[in-house]
Image (cartoon, rainbow, N blue to C red):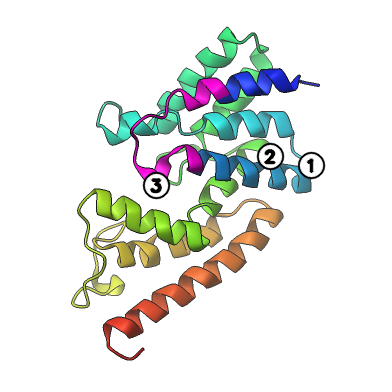
Amino acid sequence: MMAEGKMREIEERARSFFGDVNPAHDWHHVQRVTELAEKLAEEEDADRKIVQASALLHDIGRGKEDEGLIDNHAEWGAEKSGEVLEELGFEDSFIEAVEHCIRSHRYSKRPDPRTLEAEVLSDADNLDALGACGIARTFTYGGERGKIIADPDLPADEDESVAGKTSLNHLEKKILNLKDQMYTDSGLEVAEKRHRYVNDFVERMKKEMEGIK
């Protein structure tokens, strides 16, 4: 069994990549995803060490992508994580497993997960985009990029953009589709509850914009 000290080393190295990053993808996001991933791994009987290491390292390239320095943080993060784990003395099989988890965790631009551990990480990452945290992250991310909160003249069903031109439309066009992207039964169980929360929020916000509530 991997010593706890080794996992702390991974955590320290992972955290070093997070400086002045967007709050929607900061270290707190990594902590939440790690907690979710560990719980899903236990329920799904996945390798908890692979899952934990993958969760801690999964977004180390996010800051570079947001700065426009790389095109795909998942691909870059997988390669860099491999280097980190090699430096820390991990075996090739463990490194390859973690690299695949990270490479395939992204909602878009990803290969399909081909291991249970990769499915668990993907589910955990998507779960943090749902529920109350997901709503907060959506508006934080939109605000950082100057995206308006909502436009009553541009409902989601008339918004031709993929991710939504407003933060409210993003919730409808992307976030509310995440439930159907779950791979594990445990992930789906949590996703269904968080999905209902987001859906209720969207409907409430629409009514408030109409002056009904």
Q: Where is residue 90 in the image (x, y as percent from the top left)?
A: 66, 13
Q: What residue type is labelled 1?
A: Asp
Q: Residue at x 40, y 40 (%)?
A: 109
137 or 102: nearer the viewer: 137
Dot 1 falls on a residue whose secondary structure is: loop
Mark 2 vs mark 1: give the one in front. 1
Q: Where is residue 3 in the image (x, y as percent from the top left)?
A: 76, 19
Q: Residue at x 28, y 89 (%)?
A: 211
Q: Is residue 24 magenta?
A: yes
Which residue is under mark 2?
116
Dot 2 falls on a residue whose secondary structure is: helix
Q: Quadrant of the C terminus?
A: bottom left
Q: What residue type is labelled 2?
A: Leu
Residue range (magenta)? 12-28
Pointers 3 and 1 in contact (C-beta within 8 Å): no
- The first of marks 2 and 3 along the sequence is 3
Q: Residues within 10 Å of mark 1 (few under 14, many from 20)?
A: few
Pointers 2 and 1 in contact (C-beta within 8 Å): yes
Q: Visible in this render: residue 122?
A: no
Q: In which quarter of the image is the N terminus?
A: top right
User: On residue 24, which mark appears?
Assistant: 3
User: On residue 45, which mark appears?
Assistant: 1
Vertical comparison of 140 with 92: above or below: below
Q: Distance between the residues labelled 2 and 3?
A: 26 Å
- The first of marks 2 and 1 along the sequence is 1
